[in-house]
Amino acid sequence: MDSRKESQGLLALTLVFGFLAFAWHTAEPFAGALADGTPAGLFLSILVLACLGLARLDSPRRQSPVWDALFFGWSAWVVGEGVALSMALGASGLPVWAPGALKLVFYPLAFYALLRAKQFYNVGATMAAKWNAFGLTAGAVALSLYGLYGQITGLDLARHAFDIVLIGASLYAFFWSKETEEEEKPFKWIGLGFACLASYGLFVLVTTALGVYEELFYAVDALFYASFAFLALGAEKQVKLGA
């Protein structure tokens, strides 16, 4: 089986499993935390890692630094998910901060990939892409000031601050990718996926602080599941470019 068919199969599996997991979650919405320590989160993360691995293998040599960064950065995310799940099941003696610390490794590699990819794809982003990303990120910062105040401290605060920066980098990648002449535009979907993943934590904080999370959980939590679908789709688009 060639990588094109493999990537299509992984994408289909991610979409189907993500939809079923979200449907199950809406039936039991408050059975546990979504982002850390759930079997669905770990399995979806592994599927995305497999998709990124195929994209990395099929990328031209000049683009390999970007996809290497995404693959190894997401590997750290998967390990963090695995540790969080083992801790949730009581099978790990690691400190409570271990999953968050592992996931922090992901952020600098993701920033590098999102901000440098346009150079490897020979794209010169316009001011419109920069201002669109800046404006939306400023809105995320304003929301976070409300959501963060008195809510979290320590490592969680650092991780959420990284989430804000990731939203900016992801939206920038989304907007500059839309300006490319390539038909598939993988970083449009990669950027959208990371933006959804980072925004999920922000909206959970804000809606919880406002006391409306339970009324809006289906919309907020959909971001978590959609992020994996977008990431898998972006990787599949890259494989298609290399096919």
Image (cartoon, rainbow, N blue to C red):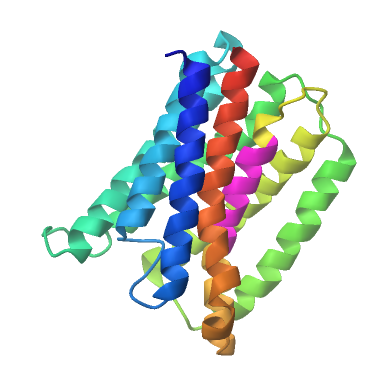
Q: Is residue 167 above or below residue 207?
A: above
List x then y, in percent, for residue 15.
51, 45
**Image mark count:** 0
Kindly give the residue lying farthest to the bottom in the view shown: 211
Query: Which corner quadrant holds the C terminus?
Result: top right
Q: Mainly helix, strand or loop, the magenta region? A: helix
Query: Which corner quadrant holds the N terminus?
Result: top left
**Image quarter for residue 237?**
top right
List x then y, in percent, for residue 74.
42, 39
Residue 151 drawn in magenta: no
Q: Is residue 113 above or below residue 42?
A: above
Residue at image point 52% right, 67% down: 221
Per the rendered image, the range of residues in magenta is: 188-199
**Image quarter for residue 96?**
bottom left
**Image quarter for residue 190?**
top right
Q: Is residue 146 above or below residue 116?
A: below
* Near-viewer residue (99 or 7): 7
Residue at image point 55% right, 16% down: 59
Residue 194 drawn in magenta: yes
List x then y, in percent, for residue 101.
33, 53
Residue 64 as seen in the image, left or right of residue 20: right
List x then y, in percent, for residue 68.
47, 24
For the question of whether residue 191 can be seen, the reply is: yes
Residue at image point 59% right, 17% down: 63
For the question of whether residue 68 can be seen, the reply is: no
